[in-house]
Image (spheres, rainbow, N blue to C red):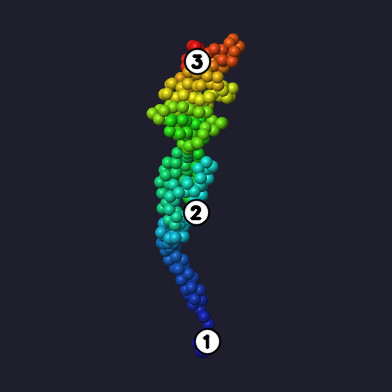
Amino acid sequence: MTMADEEVEPTDVTVMVAGPDFARRRLRARLRRWRPFLITGLVVVLVATAVWLIWFSSVVTVRDVEVTGNSAVGTARIERVAQVPLDRQLVRVDLGAIQARVEAIPAIRTVAVSRSWPHGIKIEVTERVPIAVVSRGTGLQAVDDDGVLFGSYARPPADLPLVRTDPNVKAAALAEAARVIRSLRSDIAASVEDVDVASIDKISLRLTGGITVVWGSADSSAAKAEVLAVLLRTAKKDRGPNGGISEIDVSVPGRPTTR
């Protein structure tokens, strides 16, 4: 009898089947042991690639600058002052420095600078809103409700009151004058020729017709406006257009005086 004619014993069949199965189990066991290292290695490669792309490559660099929120201040001026470094990696751009430079423009009130991935820098500005025009003997400038001077005018705009003061008056006094102007009733504001500011508590109004109103500070402005309206109506009824009055003092609204 030849070897080919020999029957395969059951034990031989078991060995033949178990051999490949055992190898597969060993391979799976090895993969389980190596899986944390493989995953960690893959993560390291991905992170390193991302760091290189963002921090060192030319793939994610500044190519565009977008300015929004401006109308009085030109976009070209804001971009020039901002000095955004084109072609620099976007993540390396100093947003705080850009913000500080743009905020130095007097007509800009607030600035927000952000990255616009993958290639942009966005500059959002809020401009100051003029509430009056200030004459300090050196030309005309706008002033906002914070008392900040900005811009310039060749002549006073018809829709803004004129504030007269001198160069030594502080911003706080100008801000106080702005509060007074905002508090005026529309009928009184329409008759104001100009506002004189000597200090934070020495503010007066000159009305059409030559009446001077001593206002003081912005405190109790609503009450002062009501008292002034009553006195003006009474004066016109009693003595004609101005009632012969040249000055009304409402700085203490509970004890107004006229002369």
- Single out the residue that lies furthest toward the left: 168
Q: Amino acid at mark 2?
A: Asp
What x and y, as percent, mark residue 220?
49, 19
Q: Amino acid at mark 3?
A: Glu
Camera-nearest label, 3 or 2:
3
Callouts 3 and 1 close, C-beta under 8 Å = no
Q: Label 1 to label 2, Cα distance in Å?
A: 81 Å
- Single out the residue that lies furthest toward the bottom: 1
| Mark earlier in primary sequence (3, 2) | 2
Camera-nearest label, 1 or 2:
2
Q: Which structural element holds mark 3? A: strand
Q: In the rendered image, which residue does mark 1 sit on?
A: 4
17 versus 79 height, above or below: below
Mark 1 Cα shell of 10 Å, populated few (<14), some (14-19), many (≥20): few
As drawn, the label of residue 247 is 3
Q: Amino acid at mark 1?
A: Ala
Q: Which structural element holds mark 2? A: strand
Camera-nearest label, 3 or 1:
3
In front here: 43 or 135? 135
- The residue lying at 47 percent from left, 40 percent from top is 108
- The residue lying at 51 percent from left, 89 percent from top is 2
* Res 50 seen here: no
In front here: 35 or 165? 165
Q: In the rendered image, which residue does mark 2 sit on?
A: 64
* Res 26 seen here: yes
